[in-house]
Image (cartoon, rainbow, N blue to C red):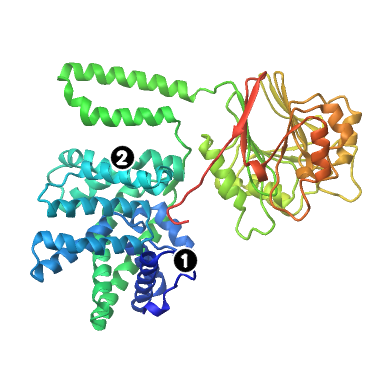
Amino acid sequence: NLSEAPVPQNRNDGNFLFATGFRLKAAAIGQLHRWLPATEASVMAGMLLGDTDALDRDLKTSFRITGLSHIMAVSGANVAFILLPLLWLFKRLGLNRRLASAVSIPFLCMYVLMTGFEASIVRAALMAACMLLGQLLWRKNDALTSLSLACLLMLSCNSQWFFDAGFQLSFLATLSIALFYERIKLHIPKKVPGVVKDTLAGTLAAQVGVFPVLLSTFHTLSLLSLPANLIVVPFTGIITFLGALGLSIAIPIPAAGLFLGKILSFLLSALIRFIQAAADIPGAERIVASPPWLLVLLYVFWLMYFRYGYVCFVREKRIVVTVGALALSILVMLVVMLPDKRLHVYVADVGQGDGMLLKTPAGAAIVIDGGGSAADKEGSRAGEKVMLPLLLSVGVIQPDLLVSTHGHADHILGLISLEEQMGAKAISLSGREPVTGATATYLDLAKEKQMGIQKVQAGDVVWVEKDFVLKVLSPTSEWSPPDNDGNKTALVLLLQYKDFSMLFMADAGEEAEALLLQSDQLPKLDVLKVGHHGSATATSTAFLDRIQPAVGVVSVGRNRYGHPAKDTLKRLSAAAVTVHTTRSDGAFVLKTDGRAYSWYPFVVERVSLFD
């Protein structure tokens, strides 16, 4: 029923073709929900049209854990299931091959419009169009040539597609299948049945190509991907074909659509139960860090060597060349794994809160606060969507130390999320803060997972290694604010690496600054993490005169408190401090060898096949 589909409200919502595509998509999804139960209909909508908006979050996770997310992303298989029935139908209607190819192209274009111009479907459609045009011109189709043309056309229209995960996965999977499918198939024993052999060769070939992108983009590795694909992929082809057939005949023959809906409901229900059961297997998925680019180059080298170079040598030389290349690769891997002897300070953009990562010269990973929000209903968005991807993108699978400066939501909830998802070797927290609320949860999780626990105060060293120390300047053992204000008992941390120094003020205000001014522990600084998100009650003129920082970092997001305060920014400007705020400038990374330092923007993007 097209009248039930959403219609663009103004000219900016799309032209006639896009509007028609949206209407047809809405009508198709509506038809699926008439035949099928809600869950099965949402899965079918994903398999046919790439629409996963209605798919349950837990079910999405199950698809990811089992390595079957790709069946919910429209691609070449979908195009094939649309074109093959069309070409067969046109042939039955008496059209010759060339005319059938010409008539099929508009239907192909409409399908692309219905799926919302996803990179994978545009790639598949362009390659299919090359095949159809080849039929018209009596030319033989070549997969690599079609793939190259599709890539050139897409990037010519929108160069930003190059950075899209869907674009990367689609092209790499197709390229890898073209290069390695036949070679892999030749090495599978002849006794293996044909369908299993084809599925195994295709799955392995595709996985070989997309492996580095899956690690660096999604940071997960499914240990069930190969067996799950062997079992599921042949049946998904049947399900997708039946779904496409059902949509084609539902309007002229409603009874046939309902009959196919019964069959699809049974098959989809079985598929969902299998995926959910497989996802419940312990250890089915592993969190992985992004591989260094040198290791990715090594990986590509070995793929190309076994595809092309290996056969270029006679047996004796082949062994010598392979052993030599393997030894060189091991040497490169060892060099890549060595710390670079520099300090890296990552200041994440966690919105209104603090979230920072230190990678020490010796390679240890220390997280100071993790962002968060009291409004978060499930965990911490900053922890799950910002801090976790940050750590994985710089090669950290498990932090060495989590440091909570105090128990306010915008500092500690992200740490709790990291405890749940990554764990840590140890945690640290203020010894002067009452153990209640989120702080109690933070501490209980550490005990449950048998992490080391440090309760620290002024004078304690949080972390030390050669030329590097992270120590506590506040709160002191004598100071107990009468109102038990968490901001006043927050940890103030001083980092020193050779000649470089940086002060992390957390949410400490003028009271803590006044006490620090009375001590002899406060040196002149290179960088100041400005206290309390730039609040007017922090970063006094006397304090700035004492520490004389060159750079001031304000970790802040949208807020109702007026942070950073204009008066604070004026004081920083008057002290000739270069100010960087995460709200306006985003995240950044600072690198130093202990003498000179440099800093620049840092971007981490977490993408999902569904979100």
Q: Image check: 125 left or right of 517?
A: left
Q: Quadrant of the N terminus?
A: bottom left
Report whether residue 283 is seen: yes
- In the image, 545 versus 423, the foreground residue is 545
Assess disc 1: are there few (<14), some (14-19) or many (≥20) residues with their C-alpha within 10 Å of its C-alpha. Answer: few
In percent of the image, x 74 and y 50: which residue is there? 408
In percent of the image, x 84 and y 45: which residue is there? 536
Residue 277, given in percent of the width and then of the height, sits at: 39, 60
Residue 333, given in percent of the width and then of the height, sits at: 42, 24
How many discs mark residues in the rendered view? 2
- In the image, 304 versus 162, the foreground residue is 162
Report whether residue 431 is seen: no
Assess disc 2: are there few (<14), some (14-19) or many (≥20) residues with their C-alpha within 10 Å of its C-alpha. Answer: some
Residue designated by label 2: 208
Q: Spatial distance from mark 2 to mark 1, Cα to Cα?
A: 44 Å
In percent of the image, x 22 and y 38: which residue is there? 179
When asked about the image quadrant of residue 492, the answer is top right
Amino acid bearing label 1? Arg
Which element is circle 2 on? helix
Q: Image check: 527 left or right of 515?
A: left
Mark linked to residue 11? 1
Select label 2 or label 1 by which is in front: 1
- In the image, 426 versus 236, the foreground residue is 236
Mark linked to residue 337? none
In percent of the image, x 25 and y 64: which residue is there? 107
Residue 228, given in percent of the width and then of the height, sits at: 32, 53
